[in-house]
Image (spheres, helix red, strand yellow):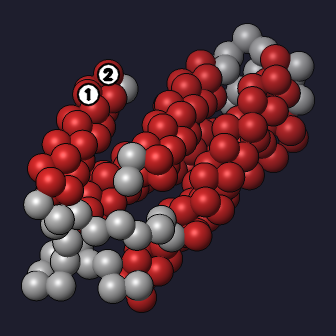
Amino acid sequence: MASMAMAFAGLTSGYVVSRSSLRAVGGWMEFPLPSLFYISTVVIVLGSVFLIVANAAAKKDNNSRVVLGVGLALLSGIVFLILQIKGWGQLVDNGIFFAGSDSNSAGSWVYAISGVHILHLLGGVIALMVTFFKALKGRYTSTDKLGLELSSIYWHFLDVLWVYLFLFLLFIR
């Protein structure tokens, strides 16, 4: 997670440097973030809430709530991925492209930052799938919940990271 934080620190630093140098010569494009990015932010935060519920349920040996919480978190991860990709579609519909003659550095940075986050989120979705199938088998109890806790920590990290990235992209225009 530390290396991921450093990677995103580098990406956001690159964005700031690019923005500063291109704004000076009038080459930085201003555009609103896709509306689906707002919705996906709520969805990923809900995923963390569901994992908090699942962890609390594991402490009480309530496996059905563990399964429900992890299952809803997994679903929120999948929905987040879909919303992000559809958000890219909104960018394209608004003439914001990642590369090519019609692209602008501002748009390319939004694609790059959100795309790298999506790649890491795929790892989180895979971890939640494994956690979900183990929860279905009753694996997580008050005395054995390490896998649930570890996947939750990773998911919470991805959640906080996305909220940071979203706010960064929203306010550092």
Percent across and percent down for residue 145 are: 67, 20
For residue 40, above or below residue 35:
above
Which type of secondary structure does the marked residue at label 2 adopt?
helix
Query: Is residue 83 or residue 19 the one in the foreground?
Result: 19
The residue singled out by tag 2 in the image is 2
Give the x, y percent position of residue 161: 46, 37
Is 127 on the left or on the right of 70, as rendered? left
Image position of 11 (left or right of 71): left
| Amino acid on which the number 1 mark rests in the picture | Met
Q: Is residue 147 left or right of residue 102?
A: right
- Residue plotted at (50% across, 31% down): 157
* Mark 1 element type: helix
Q: Residue furthest top?
A: 143
Task: Give the distance between the C-alpha atoms of the residues marked 1 and 2, in whole angstroms.
Answer: 6 Å
Question: Is there a contact, CB below 8 Å, between mark 1 and mark 2?
Answer: yes
Of 71 and 22, which appears nearest the observer? 22
Residue 6 shows which numbered tag?
Answer: 1
**Residue at horizontal 59%, vertical 19%?**
146
Going by the image, does 99 lie left or right of 89? left
Disc 2 marks a residue whose amino acid type is Ala
Residue at 48% x, 65% y is 33
Q: Position of residue 102 (x, y in %)?
A: 18, 85
Percent x, y of residue 43: 67, 54
Q: Residue at horizontal 41%, vertical 84%?
A: 94
Q: Is residue 85 above or below residue 158?
A: below
Q: Viewer-nearest of labels 1 and 2? A: 1
